[in-house]
Image (spheres, rainbow, N blue to C red):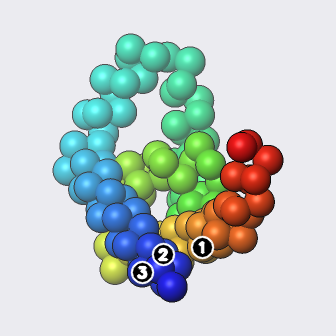
């Protein structure tokens, strides 16, 4: 019964969190990335790869990145740095968040009872 409610709330929370990181990247991303890569120079290559990926793929890149565990967390900052269209960013990001959360929440509902039987 609660499945749709939980899924909708998790998507809303994910979108709001991605907005915060998007605006962080939009307004202070270059400064933030410069400071970060100065402190962690080994990460500079990965960050530049993500920026290039987004330049090449655009909003589809945001959607795909939302389906990859580590990339889904940080993709909003490079999207903000690149000043992507906010409405399109939100739509593609929300779709990726919806699919990711839907899969794992569904798995939890389906497998949840069975896992508790094995634990106890």
Q: Tags 2 and 3 in contact by the CB under 8 Å rule? A: yes
Please name the residue shown 34% across and 64% down the image.
13
Q: CA distance from mark 2 to mark 1?
A: 6 Å
> Which mark identifies residue 1?
none
Q: Local crowd at mark 1 within 10 Å, few (<14), some, or many (≥20)?
A: some
Q: Position of residue 38 (x, y in %)?
A: 38, 17
Q: In the image, is residue 70 above or below residue 32? A: below
Residue 3 seen from this side: yes
- Residue 89 visible somewhere in the drawing: no
> Residue visible at 70% across and 52% down?
116
Given contact means CB atoms under 8 Å apart, are the residues at marks 2 and 1 in contact?
Answer: yes
Residue to which mark 3 is pinned:
5
Estimate the x, y position of residue 92 in percent, counting from the top left. Answer: 50, 76
Outermost residue toward the front?
A: 120
Placement of 98 over or under 4, stated as above or below: above
Q: Nearer the viewer, residue 91 or 110?
A: 110
- What residue is disc 1 on? 102
Asked whether, in this view, residue 73 is left or right of residue 33, the answer is right
Residue on which disc 2 sits: 7
> Residue 9 or 83: which is nearer the viewer?
9
Whole-angstrom CA distance, mark 1 to mark 3, is 11 Å
Question: Which residue is farthest left?
Answer: 27
Q: Quadrant of residue 56?
A: bottom right
Crowd around label 3: few <14 · some 14–19 · many ≥20 (10 Å): few
Q: Is residue 104 left or right of residue 38?
A: right
Q: Secondary structure at mark 2?
A: helix
Count of numbered marks: 3
Q: Is residue 71 above or below residue 56?
A: above
Of mark 2 and mark 1, the one earlier in the sequence is 2
Residue at disc 1, secondary structure: helix
Please identify, in this view, whether the residue under mark 1 or under mark 3 is nearer the observer.
Answer: 3
Most foreground residue, 63 or 112: 112
């Amino acid at each position: 019964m609660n499945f749709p409610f939980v899924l909708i709330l998790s998507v809303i929370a994910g979108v709001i969190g991605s907005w915060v990181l998007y605006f962080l990247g939009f307004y202070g991303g270059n400064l933030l990335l410069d400071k970060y890569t100065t402190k962690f120079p080994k990460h500079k290559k990965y960050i530049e790869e993500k920026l290039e990926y987004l330049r090449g793929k655009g909003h589809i890149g945001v959607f795909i990145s939302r389906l990859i565990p580590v990339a889904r967390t940080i993709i909003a900052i490079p999207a903000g740095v690149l000043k992507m269209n906010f409405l399109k960013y939100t739509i593609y990001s929300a779709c990726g968040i919806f699919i990711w959360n839907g899969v794992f929440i569904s798995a939890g509902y389906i497998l949840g009872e069975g896992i508790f039987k094995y634990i106890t």
